Image (cartoon, rainbow, N blue to C red):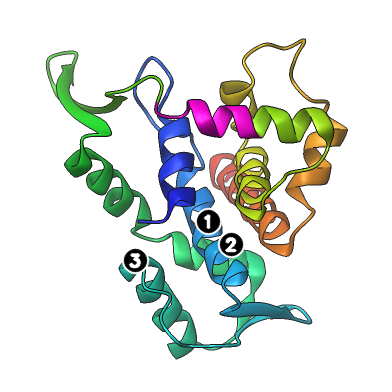
Amino acid sequence: MSALLEELTLLSHESANGRAGTYLDLGLGGAVLYELALAGRIGLDGKKVRVLDPSPTGDPLIDSRLAAIAADKPRSAHALVDRTAKGLLPTVRDGLVASGALRHERGKALWVFTTNRYLSNDRNATAGARTRLASAARTGRAFDPRTEALLSLVVAIRLEKTVFPDRQMRPSRKELKAFAEAHWVGAATRKAVNNRDGANAAATSS
């Protein structure tokens, strides 16, 4: 499985309640598109994402999404983030449970409702990712494309308070926004998150 998908999922589940960040599914959709873009398989042509090279990357999960994109009509980047995200979270999370990185705990709320928590089995599992993210945020540049991608997705799905819990050490909104929109996939993921917020607000008010 892609390290980008794994790291984003583990970071999102590091809260004490063991529940994922609200927009993790969209972040994972963005992570898949990042992997495909970095591998030269897809690119942005005007306002649409197109397949540049349909050959497999060697990662079954990434390749299944590439095949789906190739079989579909060209879509806008943010729409493709949303479409690619469907069904990803359970697959990635189950893979991390199977590998032992996460443990799944079931419980009951009010003795009636089933609850699910996914807790890290190793609190140091994301230490490397956190160090890379902190360095990138501090210097204003990432030393490798995947760190840049991870930071942009962290910002896009509003996970920065989890990754940078110290308010005084947290990068400014301006600095974080620059990372979030440095690549078209990050900008598209951020737009997909904003669109979901808008749809939820409209549904609540109707």
From this viewpoint, which residue is outermost toward the right?
Answer: 174
The answer to whether the residue labelled 1 contacts the one labelled 2, judged by CB atoms less than 8 Å apart, is: yes
Residue at image mark 3:
61
Does residue 165 sit above or below 77 in this rendering? above
Is 149 positioned to the left or the right of 103 in the image? Answer: right
Residue that sits furthest to the left in the current view = 111
Q: Which residue is drawn at 66% across and 54% down?
A: 145
- Mark 3 to mark 1 CA distance (whole Å): 12 Å
Q: Is mark 1 on a helix, strand or loop?
A: helix
Residue type for callout 2: Tyr
Q: How far apart are marks 3 and 2 (CA)?
A: 13 Å
Q: Which residue is disc 2 drawn over?
A: 34
Q: How crowded is mark 2: few (under 14 residues within 10 Å), some or many (20 or more)?
A: many
Position of 149 relative to 99 (above/below): below
Q: Judge by depth and name the residue closer to the eye, 165 or 60.
A: 60
Query: Quick one: label 1, few (<14), some, or many (20+) residues within 10 Å?
Result: many
Upstream in sequence: badge 3 or badge 1? 1
Q: Relative to 50, does residue 32 appear above or below in the rendering?
A: above
Q: Residue at x 61, y 39 (%)?
A: 154
Residue pictured at 34% horizontal, 66% vertical: 61
* Label 3 neighbour load within 10 Å: few <14, some 14-19, many 20+: some
Q: Where is residue 12 in the image (x, y as percent from the top left)?
A: 46, 32
Which residue is painted at 56% across and 57% down in the image? 30
In the rendering, at what x and y percent does residue 23 appear?
Answer: 51, 42
Residue range highlighted in magenta = 125-132
- Residue 10 placement (x, y as % from top left): 41, 34
Amino acid beneath label 1:
Ala
The quarter of the picture where the N terminus appears is: bottom left
Sequence-wise first label, 3 or 2:
2
Marking on residue 31: 1
Q: Taking 202 as reference, is 84 above or below it?
A: below
Residue 206 on image: x %, y %: 57, 46
